[in-house]
Image: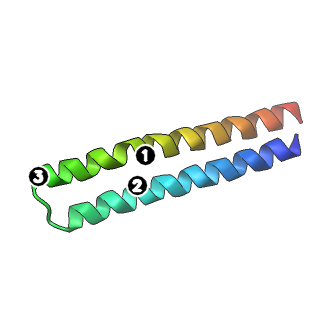
Amino acid sequence: MESLIWIGTALSIAGLAGLLWCIARVWRARRSNLSDQDLRDAVRRVVPWNMGALLLSAFGLIMVITGIMLG
């Protein structure tokens, strides 16, 4: 079960990196003085990536918890 913990940890870290990338991308869009509609479009393009990264991180945490409970 130790491998399940390490795989889950890797998935959680990858999800966290994805979330940080989404934050940085929106932050750059906000600082570039875009119009309101362009800023909304930029955020709208990031939302699916944000949700995917959050899901990946949650799956990783579930795997870690499962590995700990079974180990």
At 82% across and 32% down in the image, what residue appears? 69
Q: CA distance from mark 2 to mark 1?
A: 6 Å
Corner quadrant of residue 31: bottom left
- Does residue 67 sit above or below 50 in this rendering? above
In-image side of 15 versus 40 (left or right): right
CA–CA distance between discs 3 and 1? 20 Å
Label 3 SS: helix
Question: Which residue is the site of mark 3?
Answer: 36
Q: Secondary structure at mark 2?
A: helix
In x, y percent, where is residue 56? 58, 42
Q: Amino acid at mark 3?
A: Asp
Place of residue 9 in the rendered image (x, y in percent of width and height, measured from the top left): 71, 50
Look at 62% across and 54% down and name the residue there: 13
Write down the quadrant of residue 51 in the picture: top left
* Numbered label attached to residue 22: 2
Quickly name the residue at label 1.
50
Tag 2 near tag 1, CB within 8 Å: yes
Q: Residue at x 28, y 44 (%)?
A: 44
